[in-house]
Image (cartoon, rainbow, N blue to C red):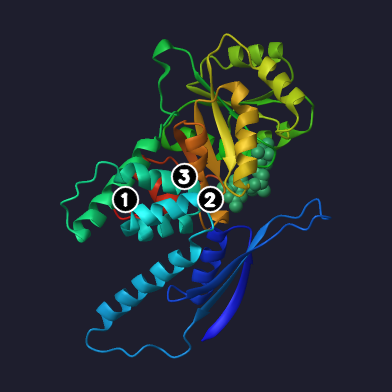
């Protein structure tokens, strides 16, 4: 047996690294928690997992496929049994709905938190028909879980031509510094202008003159779109008034730390205009779940209409999106998957979103 020790911030990350580095046949041999060092203020509790893989390839007979699938099942069950005790919710799920082992493992591998995964499975297994055969139960459970996920998630393409009122749709992007707001606006502006043939104007709202305008202006210059800065509520009203003939006006906001409540409130006050502005909360999936949650809370003062999740190309698992939507339920309007403007932009439908989150197809196959 070829054994290795993996350390990670949590069990999901450890399993993901094990599966990636040792493959699906890897077995978990032992787990332990490593307490946070009391003297290190930045230290975190970690988990240490010993995993191993057989060095000899298994004998393949005529029933090789069946054998391989049985072995994978057994390895998965061993994984899960080894994990019992790491969290109370998981323990409950495994005791009461043992057939959900594979589903739970799938969720954890996608990066969905253990507590949400357990809750979804518990809900999905409520009212299950006791007369079903084990095979049918699993199939039904998978369908129910997928149903739960789909019920949680919604998408909305906010950026269609809808100016029946004769006024442009004004959409502002808010979120922490560096998440990709300006880049996303540039991508979206290009799609709206060149694919959807809309008239598009850009405004950069900045309460601190940090030079955010230049970046947007450069993109606007390439696409031949009007672009103006606004440093006050009056500036913004003027800018929106000047762009009245547009179909869509996209507002970029200067990035601020989500801990800087004062600056966030200044931007909020600045955007209080008579134009109805839709708000799109932009969050990067590279952030840790807890930071994403805190940022979303800080920017919730804008009462956002949709989420934009950026940088999905930079992570292996996007399950945290499901956790974030569970925290604050909003439809997802856009996803971004790279730095290329305008290519790396996705206007997702629900199926695409589930696929991104769970990394799977959506026909009951969690
Ligand atoms: N990998 C990756 N990088 C991105 C994506 N979107 C934006 N970026 C990069 O993130 C950095 C910050 O982007 P920017 O638009 O200036 O962020 P802002 O501060 O929110 O406006 C830049 O280097 C972008 O190229 C994405 O979807 N994937
Ligand atoms: Mg910016």
Q: Quadrant of residue 310?
A: top right
Residue 31: percent from left, percent from top:
57, 68
Crowd band around label 2 with a 10 angstrom C-alpha radius: few (<14), some (14–19), many (20+): some
Q: CA distance from mark 3 to mark 1?
A: 18 Å
Q: Is residue 239 left or right of residue 323?
A: right
Q: Nearer the viewer, residue 195 or 284?
A: 284
Q: Look at the numbered disc 1 and say if its residue's Cβ is closer than 8 Å to ligand 1.
A: no
Residue 2: percent from left, percent from top:
54, 85
Quarter placement of the C terminus: bottom left
Q: Quadrant of ligand 1?
A: top right
Residue 290: percent from left, percent from top:
62, 43
- Total numbered badges shown on the rendered structure: 3
**Among numbered discs 2 and 3, the one appearing first in the sequence:** 3
3 vs 1, front mark:
3
Residue 358: percent from left, percent from top:
42, 52
Q: Is residue 197 left or right of residue 314?
A: left
Q: Is residue 284 left or right of residue 234?
A: left
Residue carrying label 2: 312
Residue 298 vs 58, above or below: the answer is: above
Q: Quadrant of residue 124?
A: top left
Q: Which residue is found at the position 35% from the left and 52% from the top?
A: 96
Q: Which residue is found at the position 35% from the left and 36% from the top?
A: 151
Residue carrying label 1: 362
Q: Which residue is found at the position 74% from the left and 20% from the top?
A: 231
Residue carrying label 3: 116
Q: Look at the numbered disc 2 and say if its residue's Cβ is closer than 8 Å to ligand 1.
A: yes
Question: Residue 147: in sight, yes or no?
Answer: yes
2 vs 3, front mark:
3
Q: Secondary structure at mark 3?
A: helix
Q: CA distance from mark 2 to mark 3?
A: 21 Å
**Among numbered discs 2 and 1, the one appearing first in the sequence:** 2
Q: Quadrant of residue 24?
A: bottom left
């Amino acid at each position: 047996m070829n054994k290795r020790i993996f350390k990670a911030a949590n069990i999901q990350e450890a399993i993901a690294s094990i599966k990636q580095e040792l493959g699906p046949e890897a077995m978990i041999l032992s787990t332990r928690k490593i307490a946070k060092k009391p003297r290190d203020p930045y230290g975190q509790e970690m988990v240490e997992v010993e995993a191993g893989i057989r060095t000899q390839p298994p004998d393949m007979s005529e029933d090789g496929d069946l054998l391989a699938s049985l072995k994978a099942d057994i390895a998965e069950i061993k994984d899960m049994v080894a994990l019992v005790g790491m969290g109370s919710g998981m323990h409950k799920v495994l005791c009461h709905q043992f057939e959900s082992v594979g589903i739970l493992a799938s969720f954890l591998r996608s990066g969905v938190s253990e507590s949400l995964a357990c809750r979804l499975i518990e809900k999905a297994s409520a009212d299950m028909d006791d007369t079903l055969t084990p095979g049918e139960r699993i199939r039904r459970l998978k369908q129910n879980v997928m149903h739960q996920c789909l019920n949680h998630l919604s998408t909305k393409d906010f950026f269609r031509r809808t100016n029946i009122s004769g006024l442009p749709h004004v959409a502002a992007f808010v979120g922490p510094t560096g998440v990709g707001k300006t880049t996303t606006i540039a991508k979206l502006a290009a799609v709206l202008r060149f694919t959807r043939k809309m008239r598009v104007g850009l405004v950069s709202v900045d309460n601190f003159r940090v030079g955010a305008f230049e970046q947007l202006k450069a993109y606007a210059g390439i696409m031949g779109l009007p672009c103006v800065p606004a440093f006050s509520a009056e500036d913004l009203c003027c800018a929106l008034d000047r762009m009245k003939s547009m179909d869509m006006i996209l507002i970029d906001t200067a990035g601020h730390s989500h801990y800087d409540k004062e600056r966030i409130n200044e931007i909020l006050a600045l955007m209080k205009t008579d134009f109805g502005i839709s708000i799109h909360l932009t969050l990067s999936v590279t952030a840790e779940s807890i930071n994403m949650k805190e940022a979303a809370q800080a920017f919730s003062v804008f009462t956002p209409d949709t989420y934009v999740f950026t940088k999905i190309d930079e992570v292996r698992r996007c399950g945290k999106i499901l956790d974030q939507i569970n925290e604050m339920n909003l439809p997802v309007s856009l996803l971004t998957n790279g730095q290329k403007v305008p290519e790396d932009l996705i206007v997702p439908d629900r199926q695409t979103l589930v696929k991104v989150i769970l990394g799977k197809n959506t026909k009951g196959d969690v």
